[in-house]
Every structure is written in structure tokens, then in C-alpha cells.
Amino acid sequence: MKPILIIAEVMGECVRPVTWELIAAARMIQNLIEKEGGVNKKKFPGIQVIVPAQNPMPLAKKISSHGGIDVLALEIPTPAAYTSEAYKNWLSPEISELAPSHILVAHTSQGRDFAPGLAVRLKAVSISGVNRIVSDGDGLLYSRPVLNNTRNMVLRPESGLPVVLTLMAGSFSPQTYEAKDPGLIITKKISPKPGLPVQMVHEKILKQETNNQALKMAQTIVAAGRGIGEKSNLEAVLRFAKCFSSSAVGASRPLVDMGWIGYDQQVGITGASVAPMLYLACGISGSSQHLAGMKESDWVVSINKNPDAPICRHADLCITAGVMEFIRTFLEND
């Protein structure tokens, strides 16, 4: 039975937590294949994690002890910093030798960067942004958000081809798994192929200065989304937030990308993860990235004119109204 591969998300000298979610998704696929095909233990698909790093052994040991997972520790040449070209050059030959059925990658800026190109080199199916995996008896189905995250598209890949999946963070919860023994660790050193042109050279990573302590400490967060309409409406949102004690103003990524609000106020996977007592989502549709950043909130209120917005399925209270009309009416009667 073909193995299931996971490409660990390595940043610096650390394994990013999303890797444990990839392992949970791999186990889910493993179980679905077993139930669907009546696979016996001898043919049960194995799971292996690939750890590409300049010094992969400490990371490999940590992963192998996590539920007895087998690990391929790939010692990559210097410079150790990530580029999509290097990952595709290093990983595609190793993955081809292993002939997996699935290759799981995190749907992060790094994973989205190299996974589609890797799939091309492997002549594999590429499905990005997967948030759910199920079986219907005829094979596995993969769900991904579309139409501004208001709908999910269900896809069935062509039979017999390997599948490269990028998985949405927060969609597959890591599970505690006890194993008697750690998994097997195989070490391998990657040597650059002579004559292979290097078209991309890593220079440095510039970390944007942020100070999101206000969001971290706030008991109430009023988060603005694209539904507020205009940048000038942020003033009313700020006044609305001041109506609540120990409050702070947050935002979804589109407002940050448009330059309406600072990055230190962004809530989501690429921003701050928050856990206030009250989270007021104002004109936010609710992408999976945003939901992952505010899922620990005690109480969520959505103000959105679209009752079918994804945020409404995760809110404790949904107010179906134009967000600025609601805020201005609230302020007039405060």
C-alpha cells in the first residue's frame, strides 16, 4: 500500500505547530482508506514525515516520538533558508522514490508557494486549501472553500494519481496519540546536482514589527472586515469599540492588505490569535484563516447582512443587518 507523506513546516530551527495538524489529517486519510477498502494490517498505508532542515535530527526525534511516526530527516545544503525552487529540487526526487498516494503540506505562505510546482514535477493532482476529507464509498473526497468562503467545493481526484494537498490550518485538530516506541528515523543528505542552475537565492527574512498586545489583553474585540465599506467608516468602528470596557479594534486581512489598518491589528493565521470574552465581527465574511485566529473567543457576535456568511455558522449570535447602519444606530442610542 502506498504511503502517506507529510512535509513538515520548518521555520528556523523549529517545527511549526501546523505540522501536528498534518499528522492528524494523515491519520484520518489512513482510517478512511482502511474502512473503504477493508485494508488488512500488512497493507495498511504507512505515514512518514519529511523534515527538510540543515540540522534535521533534533526535529526528527521530536516528531518520531509523537505517536510513533516514521521520519525522513533530509539534511539540506546551505543556505538553509527556504526558497520554493530549492524545495522542489530537493523534495521531488525523494518523493518520487517513495511513490506515495498523498503528500500533505500546510496551506501557509510557504506551502502555497511550493506545493503546486511540486505537484507538477510529480505529475500529481494538486488540491489547495482543503478543509475537510470524507469518503463516499467510491473514494476520498476533498472539500475546499470557494466564492469568498461562502461555499465549499467538493473534489474527487483522478484515480491512481498521487495527490498533493495543502491543508487549512485549524481544520484538522491534533490528537493525543500514545505509542510504545518512537518511529523509525532515516537520515539522508541532499547534494546539489552539478550543472543545475540556481535561479533563486535567499537573502534574508524581514520580520514586520508588530505589537498586538492590545488584542491579546482585550476582553472585547471589535473586528472590522471589508463589509464596513470605506476606510472613513473605521472612525465609527473605533467609537463603537469604546462603548465596551477593556476593548480593542481588530481587523480581517483584506483591510490590512488595502492599507486601511495596521498589521498589528490583524486577526487570523497570519496575524494575531486571540481569545477575548466577546468577539464582535463587523462585516467579516469569515475565511478559515480568520476563524482560526479567533476560534478561542468565549462569545462571538456576527454583524453581517449576509446570513449565509461562514462567520454566521461559528457565531453564538448573528445580527443580520448592514454593519454601518447597525453601528450608527447603536451609537445614536448609546
Image (cartoon, helix red, strand yellow):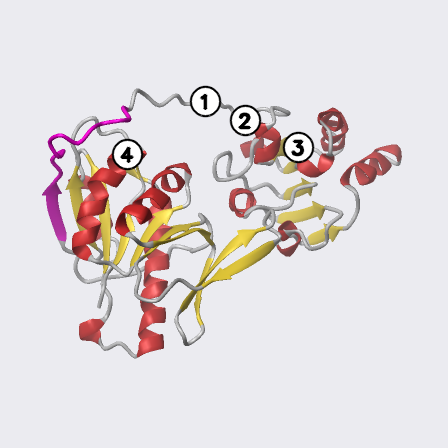
Find disc 3 in the rendering and name its residue.
247
Point out which mark residue 208 bears: 1
Percent coordinates x, y for residue 331 in the rendering: 84, 33
Mark 3 nearby-residue class (10 Å; few <14, some 14–19, many ≥20): many
Q: Which stretch did the figure color magenta? A: 185-201
Along the line of sight, the residue nearer the viewer: 223 or 176: 223
- Going from N to C along the chain, the mark reached first, 2 or 4, is 4
Percent coordinates x, y for residue 326 in the rendering: 81, 40
Find disc 2 in the rendering and name its residue.
263
Residue found 42% across the figure and 55% down from its top: 173
- Going from N to C along the chain, the mark reached first, 2 or 3, is 3
- Going from N to C along the chain, the mark reached first, 1 or 4, is 4
Q: Are marks 1 and 2 in contact (CB under 8 Å)?
A: yes
- Using the rendered view, name the quadrant where residue 13 is placed: top left
Residue 187 painted magenta: yes
Gap in angstroms between the C-alphas marked 4 and 3: 44 Å
Q: Are marks 1 and 3 in contact (CB under 8 Å)?
A: no
Gap in angstroms between the C-alphas marked 2 and 3: 18 Å
Q: Is residue 17 visible?
A: no
Residue found 49% across the figure and 23% down from its top: 210
Percent coordinates x, y for residue 219 in the rendering: 62, 37
Find disc 4 in the rendering and name its residue.
85
